[in-house]
Amino acid sequence: MPYSRAWHISAIPASFAMVLLQAHFLILLAAVVFARGFSIPQADHQHRDTADKTVLILGGGVAGVIAARTLHERGIKDFIIIEGRNELGGRLRSTSFGGKTVELGANWVQGTQTDGGPANPILTLVKKHKVQTQFNDYFGSLTTYDKTGPVDFLDVFNASVDAFTELTVAAGPRVSKSLVDLTSRGGYTLTGVRPRDAHAKAAEYFNFDWEYAQKPDQSSWVASSWNNNFTYDVDQGGFSEDNLLAIDQRGFKAFIQEEAKEFLDPSQIMLNAIVKTVSWSGVGVTVVLEDGRSISGDYALCTFSLGVLQNDDVVFKPSLPDWKQEAIASMTMGTYTKIFLQFPENFWFDTEMGLYADPERGRYPVWQSLDHESFLPGSGIIFATVTGDYSERIEALSDTQVKAEVLGVLYSMFPNVTVPDPLDFMFPRWFSDPLYRGSYSNWPPSFFREHHDNLRANLGRLFFAGEATSQKYFGFLHGAYFEGLNVGQELVKCIKGKGCVGLKHSKEVKNTSPYGI
């Protein structure tokens, strides 16, 4: 439930005029308290002649670029995007592999548009810049395996699809009655789902972990449900059930890079600039880069990933207030790892997807063929996906060790095939990378709405935006888009107005009832 303050007036004998006077006084008092709690003082709002720029945008991902576009459209041109990599795009990262461009990070437009309804803004940009995508049939083009080889357990898989739908439906009416969140594992249990064997666990993984990059027992039942429904369920305001796989050889990042070219001047971008220190106050923000350079702004927008905020790769001066640190620590960062292999020829399934049920849940379960007529035919490329704790595990291993494990799974999946040595092998280490520290955020169980408000709230002239600050769409590219747009609009209000209310926060987040011990 959104944060609010409640005032209670006891009934006392008074004339009608006195009641009106008391009510007027309380309204004025509430306004003063709100202003003192959330606004930037008027004196702090004056322009500093010593600032290098009006706005520093820290990070050149989707949120940063869309915020910059928002400023540009409102006539604010004195900004600069400071990006640690050599190109814009953030976690939209592609690379050349086996002679083809493949996506290390974000790969799909998730939820598109239905019958003239709301369009996913990522779809709009993809269409505008003619980025090549292809419908990815997650659920209808699948072959199943276990340690004995090909085994048809599609009936178990389809039951798991239905169970996930029931999970997301049940959270709505249940929470409206009890207002208590549980883990998604608890939600599954209450809806009668208890996967016990390898087939059922792999099917559940495909439906849940593969989306949220964490396990059901690590994830909020309520938040994972609305996150799914606001994207995929048209009846809940979602876009559509479709997923489009990016296969453009410019890389999926082309949609945001091409958009940036339409309004950015080269002087408004600073690449290969890694931020090490952010000094913030009510009168401005100064950042120090890894190479010692310093740049200041009247305002700054921080679009660092949640994982970066949770580590000490960037130092904030002064330290972030307790309520902000608590909010950052309360949310979680998931890791989603794609492991690419290229072979001399295609020896695997004819479907788009493969699902492997290992006795160990989460061990190289989801496989996707890029050497498929719909994607990159003739490429000889297939990739497996692991997530969460398993991603962190393999990042601690050598490439040689991981390759041996992955090939061992392929030997199990195809016992009657002589699996050749791969021509190439690669996987990214998102969790270890100081520019990301993971792939995307996830909402843990019993994470308070006030914590999320605090994660999103500004500190004086330092603002925050990214997929993690999106309540509806955390973890999604369109979440980053909407937050860049919304917080960019807040910045415009501050810059062009005579005062800046800023975004709400709670100095203390409390349980609705105390623990009784």
Image: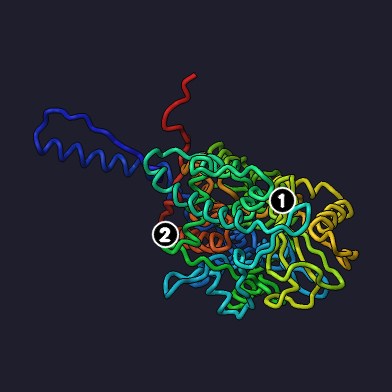
User: Against 373, is 488 above or below?
Assistant: above
What whole-number distance in Å separates the C-alpha atoms at marks 1 and 2? 41 Å
Q: Looking at the picture, how far across and down is residue 400, in whole percent?
A: 89, 54
Q: Crowdedness of circle 1 by 10 Å Cα count: few (<14), some, many (20+)?
A: some
Q: Crowdedness of circle 2 by 10 Å Cα count: few (<14), some, many (20+)?
A: few
Name the kind of residue labelled 2 in the image.
Gln
Number of marks in picture = 2
Q: Looking at the picture, how far across and down is residue 440, in whole percent?
A: 63, 54
Q: Which residue in the structure is indicated by mark 1?
A: 276
Q: Residue at x 11, y 31 (%)?
A: 14
Labelled pair 1, 2 in contact (Cβ < 8 Å)? no
Q: Looking at the picture, how far across and down is residue 183, in whole percent?
A: 54, 41
Q: Residue at x 49, y 40 (%)?
A: 190
Left or right, residue 330 beside residue 23 = right
Q: Which residue in the structure is indicated by mark 2?
A: 236
Q: Looking at the picture, how far across and down is residue 505, in whole percent?
A: 46, 44
